[in-house]
Image: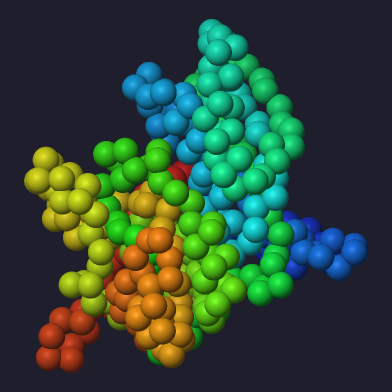
Amino acid sequence: MESALINWLRQRVPTNSQLVLGIGDDAAILQLTDGGDCVVTSDTLTDTVDFELCQCDPRRVGRKSLAVNLSDLAAMAARPIAATVALVVPRTSSADLVRDLYEGMFPLAEQFQIAIAGGDTNSWDGPLVLSITALGEVTEHGIWKRSGAQPGDAILVTGCFGGSLLGRHFDFQPRVGEALQLNAGYSVHAAIDVSDGLSLDLARLCEASQCGSLLELDCVPISPDAHRLAERRGDKSALEHALSDGEDFELILAVPLDDARRLLREQPLDVPLTRIGQFIEQPGLWHAAGGGRRERLEPSGYQHRLDT
Ligand SMILES: [Mg+2]
């Protein structure tokens, strides 16, 4: 959603004493009566916007719709517990479509030991729409928010970026285990998952943390797919794809320097961790242009557009 609309909604929703963290992060936190906290997130995928049903296996669509929610829980370092699934299928489709969508979700549900706790299926004359709500719990190590980055923190990222359109946007691994592992052993001040583009989601984290970022563009891990796409299309460099493509579903982390050094040395995850710059006081995105100069970098990525 556009940031102006998010800001309107954030101010307009009724206040609620059990809502610890509301609209504007990767997930919300609700305080339950017994004192525990529940993390809630919701994501909607629509045929022809987020995938082309006529060109792909519906099981991959089902998997993706659950995986994007798990990625938001990972961005909070929450442990996934359950999900509910709302489907609106085209009236002309068969029950096999619904079965296949669910079959795509089940292996992921088993992998992360989450319950598919319920949902609803409707039909209509429009395209397939899947909306999943995922629930997680806060571990003893607490939660990550977007708002905790501090000037001087290193910007670390998991994995590599760009070109997910070539297939990775379906088959990515939500970084749930990685987030829990990092949260248990290291200090992380803030995090976000990259759904809409590395530079755009980094800008969102900076805005929430009221700071800026100084990127070292040479250090951005570029996926082989980004190189392939750049070669095939010729309109953007591989680096530009890495900065703006979206749907990488990797994590951006704000990590204090000592822990960042330790993490980079130990590389404790199955996926590589890379330092791509540092958070700075000056708002906005910047990159080191040599000779100590900073050049502004415009965040770019995918945004759903609405008439205002
Ligand atoms: Mg997110």
Residue at (9, 45) in percent of width and height: 231
Q: Is residue 218 above or below residue 27?
A: below
Answer with the quarter of the image where residue 183 lies: bottom right
Q: Total marks drawn? A: 0
Q: Position of residue 208 (x, y in %)?
A: 52, 73
Q: Is residue 307 above or below residue 248?
A: above
Residue at (23, 59) in percent of width and height: 222
Q: Is residue 105 left or right of residue 84?
A: left
Residue at (22, 47) in percent of width and height: 225
Front in this rendered view, residue 175 or 21: 175
Q: Is residue 243 left or right of residue 5?
A: left
Q: Position of residue 247 (x, y in %)?
A: 39, 48
Q: Position of residue 178 (x, y in %)?
A: 49, 62
**Figure coloring:** rainbow
Front in this rendered view, residue 32 or 81: 81
Q: Is residue 142 left or right of residue 205?
A: right
Q: Position of residue 258 (x, y in %)?
A: 43, 90
The extreme right residue here reads 34
Res. 200 in view: no
Residue at (35, 56) in percent of width and height: 197
Res. 237 in view: yes
